[in-house]
Image: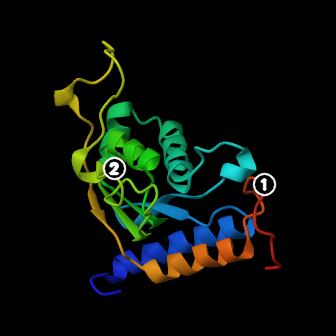
Amino acid sequence: MAGSNAHEIQFMRMALEEARKAFDRQEVPVGCVIVHNGEVIGAGSNRSNETRNATRHAELEAIDVVLEKLEKDGSSEEEASKKFQECELFVTCEPCIMCAGALAILGIGQVIFGCQNDRFGGCGSVLSLHTDGAKACGGPNPSAPQEDEKMKPFKCKGGVLADDAVALLRDFYERGNPNAPRPHRAVTAA
């Protein structure tokens, strides 16, 4: 916990609670909370298996909660964008490349994560979208952002309660992922 402050630990514990909810639903246990001015305004956990939609990661679930609230409040796109720039996102595992790209496009203010994601991490483990930002890829597209319109990089810090996040992931994978493609290791009782 060296280098972590009480604020980071408080909100990472909330993200870990979201991860435990995913664990209980037999989802990969990753949880997330979005904080604005010291208040949680969105929370989520993985729902990929439940929804049969591989994009339903904890970060995107939490973002959707915030977007729904902003829409109900009648916030404009500009107001919503400004709010996300003022937010901190706490997530138990380093955002994958997909989620890190979405966070760069969204313009999130800061991401604080628990453990690294050595296979798919988009905040330094595989790619560094938090410093490099994200840009449109593929062939020429007149409506795509130009190079000088690169999406926003964001502040990022890892290692907050990393051991707790790793322990939860280890418990999940040692138990066996019942939703993994066959053949997979037998599932043991929880």
- Where, by quadrant of the figure, is residue 51 drawn? top right
Amino acid tagged 2:
Ile
- Residue on which disc 2 sits: 108
Q: Residues within 10 Å of mark 1 (few under 14, many from 20)?
A: few
In this rendering, is residue 171 above or below 50?
below
Q: Position of residue 125 (x, y in %)?
A: 35, 61
Estimate the x, y position of residue 141 in percent, counting from the top left. Answer: 33, 15
Characterize the local packing of mark 2: few (<14), some (14-19) or many (20 or more) Cα atoms within 10 angstroms.
Answer: many
Quadrant of the frame with the N terminus = bottom left
Residue at 78%, 62% in the rendered image: 178
Q: Is residue 58 left or right of residue 179?
A: left
Cα distance between the residues tagged 2 and 1: 37 Å
Residue at horizontal 81 percent and vertical 77 percent from the top: 188
Residue occupied by mark 1: 182
Front position in the image: 91 or 179: 179
Q: Which circle's residue, 2 or 1, is located before the other in the chain?
A: 2
Secondary structure under the numbered disc 2 in the rendered image: loop
Q: Is residue 13 left or right of residue 129?
A: right
Residue 161 in the image: state x and y as whole percent: 43, 80
Residue 57 or residue 97, whichever sits in front:
97
Amino acid at pointer 1: Arg
